[in-house]
Amino acid sequence: RRSPPGPGARPLAVDLGYGASPVTTFEFYTRLRAVSPRLEVVGIEIDPDRVAAGIDFLADHGPCDGLSFRRGGFELPVPRPPVLIRAFNVLRQYDEPAAWQAWDDLRARLDPSGVLVEGTCDEIGRRAVWVTLTPDGPRTITFAAHLRTLGRPSDLAERLPKTLIHRNVPGEPVHDLLAAFDRCWATAAPHSAFGPRARWIEAVTLLAGTHPVLTRPPYGGRHRWRLGEVTLPWSAVAPK
């Protein structure tokens, strides 16, 4: 059983299932340390060769204070509850019940103030969908795209988390949302004259008229929309 963090404990973040390259965890570490200099980051992989690659990476690049790699899975072999868990492209091969169970298992291992970010993206990061969860359950869902290569918003359906991807059928909230987003995208077509970013912003603005799009920072507003993102509360897509 993990001990709760003491008053002087460093906050801990976990990059779960970081994949073939430890560089993804190193980038995660550098971005987080820029806003939380005391943060500790642990990259966790089930494949011992990938763990070895992470250790070799540190040996080649010199020690990075607070960055380490170790072998493990959903049990999270770390000394204290993390304040952040990132798990991208980890649950794609699981069936839906197993994905829900993984969410429950990971949420149970969070610090009381912690957040799990679970999602999927394509190989080059041009399509992504992720869900944020706290110990109490799912909170938000974010759709993100490289706008110059986006045909229509529903193209993001192939990157839905495993808990939703089989629910993209008529009558389910996530299907209704994406269909509405496509209609807004079509209506916003004249804005393409100003570029795909302008069209996306207009489409999201229209979508916010019928769906609970988050419109204020840090989750919403034009600053986030300009990046090709849109975030909604989980309740907007929760399966029936």
Image: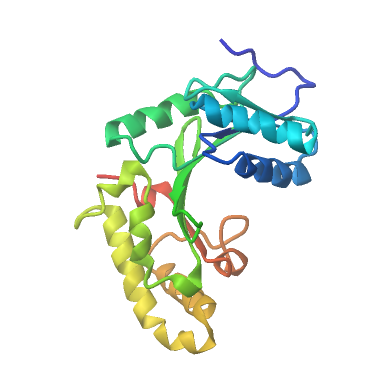
Q: Say if residue 58 shows up in the picture.
A: yes
Q: Is residue 33 left or right of residue 100?
A: right
- Residue plotted at (64% across, 43% down): 23
Q: Is residue 50 left or right of residue 56?
A: left
Q: Residue furthest left?
A: 170
Q: Residue at x 70, y 43 (%)?
A: 32
| Image location (x, y in percent) of residue 6 | 74, 17
Residue 56 locus on image (x, y percent): 68, 31
Number of marks present in the image shown: 0
Q: Nearer the viewer, residue 82 or 206?
A: 82
Q: Nearer the viewer, residue 9 or 52?
A: 52
Q: Name the residue nearer the viewer: 4 or 17.
A: 17
**Left or right relative to 145: residue 239:** left
Judged from this view, the residue extending furthest toward the top is 1
Question: Which of the colour schemes (rainbow, by chain, secondary structure, one colour) is used?
Answer: rainbow
Residue 213 lies, in percent from the top left, at 46, 61
Residue closest to the eye, 73 or 135: 73
* Quadrant of the drawing holding the C terminus: top left
Res 122 quadrant in image: bottom left
Q: Residue at x 68, y 41 (%)?
A: 26
Is residue 13 among the parts visible in the rendering?
Answer: no
What quarter of the picture does the N terminus occupy? Answer: top right
- Quarter of the rendering containing residue 41: top right
Q: Residue 126 location, x and y as percent?
A: 48, 61
| Residue 60 vertical position relative to residue 197 in the rendered view, above or below | above
Task: Give the vertical position of 21 relative to 185 (above or below).
Answer: above
